[in-house]
Image: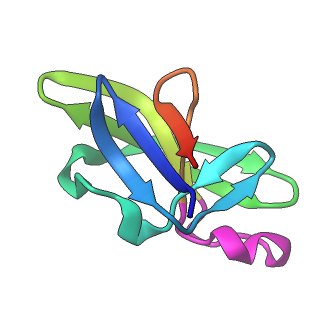
Amino acid sequence: MPKAIAKIDGVALAESDAWETVEGNVYFPPSALIHRPSFLKSDTKTYCPWKGEAEYYNVKIGDKEVKDAAWYYADPYEKAQNIKDHVAFYKTKVDVTVQE
């Protein structure tokens, strides 16, 4: 079964064999987050017309903090309920791969 993994500098942040893909982004279930204390709530919020309001996390690995590296929908609209509380990562900031 394929496995999705998100890493920064080789450190795994999330890993799961069950995830959702929306608009080319892998959304990891909350249980897939490995280093939960590394996810620091950000003040950033954005809006998607069909998913709703996204909230962001800064991710801290060692002394490095990556601003707004991940986002999630705490209260998504009806069409996006399948990604409620799932976490996605910016591909330019985090290495996200799906391994067969």
**Residue placed at 46% from the left, 29% from the top?**
94
Q: Which residues are magenta?
A: 73-86
> Residue 67 occupies which quadrant of the picture?
top left
Side of 60 relative to 26 (left or right): left
Q: Quadrant of the N terminus?
A: bottom right
Pick the front one: 78 or 42: 78
Side of 93 relative to 12 (left or right): right
Q: Residue furthest left?
A: 62
Pick the front one: 57 or 90: 90
Side of 29 relative to 8 (left or right): right
- Count the labels in the image: 0
Residue 38 x, y percent position in the rendering: 23, 45
- Can residue 56 be seen here? The reply is no
**Residue placed at 53% from the left, 68% from the top?**
85
Residue 56 x, y percent position in the rendering: 49, 46
Taking 84 as reference, is 43 above or below it?
above
Pick the front one: 42 or 38: 38
Pick the front one: 2 or 59: 2
Taking 99 as reference, is 31 above or below it?
below
Q: Is residue 5 magenta?
A: no
Residue 90 x, y percent position in the rendering: 56, 32
Taking 89 as reference, is 78 above or below it?
below
- Can residue 97 be seen here? The reply is yes
**Residue placed at 22% from the left, 52% from the top?**
35
Say how the picture is coloured: rainbow
**Residue placed at 59% from the left, 64% from the top?**
19
